[in-house]
Image (spheres, rainbow, N blue to C red):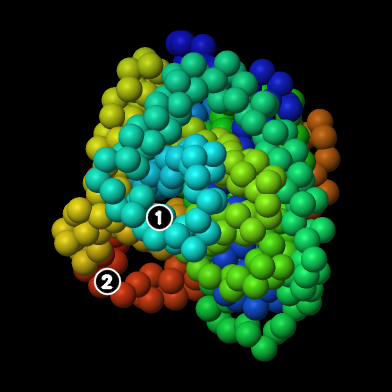
């Protein structure tokens, strides 16, 4: 046993809010709607739901089991079974680090846009697009917001599990639902909004290609915070009497419902105002203010609320990313929590400065063919998460004892988990193959070959030096 008492979640509700908070993020509110728009609406949604149910739910259950069994965060959890495997956990820690190299930049944008909603952003709808471009390429303003955003993360994570992450989740997640539903009421009732709903819920399978499946599965991974040890870490703070499969089901359902609700909030507005469901950062930061600008007096309030929603979603995700790295330093390097938080976030701030500047003054500076922002994004989203998820499934299926898994998922046989065999066989045989296909197709499609080789080399180096991690 460990000498120092390890932290735990204070309540089941608190854990659920924190885990759902990690899952619900920019992936749900910004990425999911635009992917849906690009991939044929209803058809994409059906495929996405299939991926969540088949792969996402199984991997989340597995991550919770691995975390609680060991009572340790990503690296320690793998290590407790085999030294050879610590690299898979370390890869997760590195993914957390790299995602935090750009996520707080976008988090800072959301904070800035709450303020901008009140300071004339909506006054000139035709200038909103240019204003966004000018804002993100400015060498100072986005950095200030990013630092404020990161500082809020630091305060929360430094307070620890119960009084920091859990307390924040308990307040913010219910608030997120309230705001989302308020916005839906407003947008669904817009004249012409019905067209948006029709687009969302009438599947058009003619637009579906192999790429659609890849996009859906990749999105399921990113959105559910899987493949980088985050849910292993959160599971490690769970008490022994919690029902893991049931909690995985609840978190998965909450994450999926927010993605669907976000689409339901956004699409009617796009169609009502004749805006194309365009891709990328533009959808949220350009189109949404344009839509609210045309709404009259309450537009300002709705715009501010929307960006508050985005901020809350991003914040409860980025604290989980920071926690993955911090928990590694606490568990494996025996570092005090506060020190771990300060050191980690200082490095993240430097990465974010580079990422933010890479969109503006440093746009000419590239590593492996891309700017820093894209470097952190592509490396994690396209390479590390998928491989991390595949490694976890293989680890669980082939390196952990089936009895141990059953014991963990049934709380020592005291509760039943009727779908155990289904879960086990899916995780062991089906999911590694599905993920291998996705990873192969996704990674080979990366245009910057040197970046692809770099990513794979990092994984190889980690695997070789596994015992040292
Ligand atoms: N799930 C988060 C989102 O949808 C992102 C995230 C990925 C958080 C991995 C933690 C771990 O935005």
Taking the spot 59% from the left edge, 73% from the top edge, the residue there is: 276
Taking the spot 53% from the left edge, 51% from the top edge, the residue there is: 123
In this view, the residue in front, 128 or 436, is: 128
| Quarter where residue 417 is shown | top right
Whether the residues at callouts 1 and 2 have beta carbons within 8 Å, the answer is no
Q: Position of residue 236 (x, y in %)?
A: 56, 30
CA separation in Å, label 1 and label 2 = 30 Å
Residue 405 visible in the displayed image? no
Q: Is residue 251 above or below residue 329?
A: below
Callout 1 crowding tier (Cα within 10 Å): few <14, some 14–19, many ≥20: some
Callout 2 crowding tier (Cα within 10 Å): few <14, some 14–19, many ≥20: some
Label 2 sits on a secondary structure element that is: loop
Taking the spot 44% from the left edge, 75% from the top edge, the residue there is: 441
Q: Which residue is mark 1?
A: 131
Q: Is residue 222 above or below residue 176?
A: below
Q: Is 75 left or right of 139, judged from the image as shown?
A: right
Residue 188 visible in the displayed image? yes
Residue at the top extreme?
4
């Amino acid at each position: 046993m460990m000498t120092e008492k390890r932290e735990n979640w204070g309540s089941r509700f608190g854990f659920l809010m924190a885990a759902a908070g990690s899952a619900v993020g920019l992936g749900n509110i910004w990425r999911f709607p635009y992917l849906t728009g690009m991939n044929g609406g209803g058809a994409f949604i059906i495929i996405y739901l299939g991926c969540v149910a088949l792969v996402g739910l199984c991997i989340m259950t597995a991550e919770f089991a691995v975390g609680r069994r060991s009572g340790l965060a990503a690296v320690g959890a793998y290590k407790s079974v085999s030294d050879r495997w610590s690299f898979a956990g370390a890869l997760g820690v590195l993914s957390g680090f790299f995602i935090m190299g750009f996520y707080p930049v976008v988090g800072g944008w959301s904070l800035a846009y709450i303020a901008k909603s009140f300071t004339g952003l909506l006054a000139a709808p035709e200038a909103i697009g240019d204003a966004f471009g000018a804002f993100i390429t400015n060498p100072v303003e986005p950095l200030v917001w990013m630092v404020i955003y990161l500082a809020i993360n630091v305060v929360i994570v430094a307070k620890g599990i119960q009084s920091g992450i859990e307390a924040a989740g308990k307040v913010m997640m219910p608030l997120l639902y309230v705001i989302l539903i308020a916005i839906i009421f407003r947008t669904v009732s817009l004249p012409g909004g019905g067209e948006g709903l029709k687009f969302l819920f009438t599947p058009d399978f003619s637009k579906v290609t192999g790429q659609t499946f890849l996009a859906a599965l990749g999105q399921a991974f990113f959105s559910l915070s899987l493949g980088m040890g985050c849910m292993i870490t959160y599971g490690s703070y769970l008490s022994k009497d919690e029902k893991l499969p049931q909690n995985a089901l609840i978190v998965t359902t909450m994450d999926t419902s927010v993605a669907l609700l976000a689409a339901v909030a956004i699409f009617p507005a796009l169609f009502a105002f004749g805006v194309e469901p365009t891709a990328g950062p533009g959808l949220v930061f350009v189109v949404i203010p344009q839509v609210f600008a045309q709404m009259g007096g309450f537009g300002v309030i709705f715009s501010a609320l929307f960006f508050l929603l985005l901020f809350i979603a991003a914040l409860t995700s980025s604290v989980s990313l920071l926690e993955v790295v911090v928990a590694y330093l606490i568990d494996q390097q025996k570092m005090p929590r506060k020190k771990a938080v300060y050191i980690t976030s200082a490095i993240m701030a430097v990465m974010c400065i580079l990422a933010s500047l890479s969109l503006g003054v440093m746009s000419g500076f590239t590593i492996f063919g891309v700017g820093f922002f894209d470097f952190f994004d592509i490396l994690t989203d396209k390479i590390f998460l998928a491989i991390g998820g595949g490694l976890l499934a293989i680890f669980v299926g082939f390196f952990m004892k089936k009895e141990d898994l059953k014991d963990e998922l049934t709380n020592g046989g005291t509760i039943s988990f009727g779908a155990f065999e289904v879960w086990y066989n899916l995780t062991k045989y089906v999911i590694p193959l599905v993920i291998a296909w996705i990873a192969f197709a996704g990674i080979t499609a990366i245009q910057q070959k040197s970046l692809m080789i770099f990513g794979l080399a990092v994984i190889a180096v980690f695997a070789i030096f596994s015992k040292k991690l």
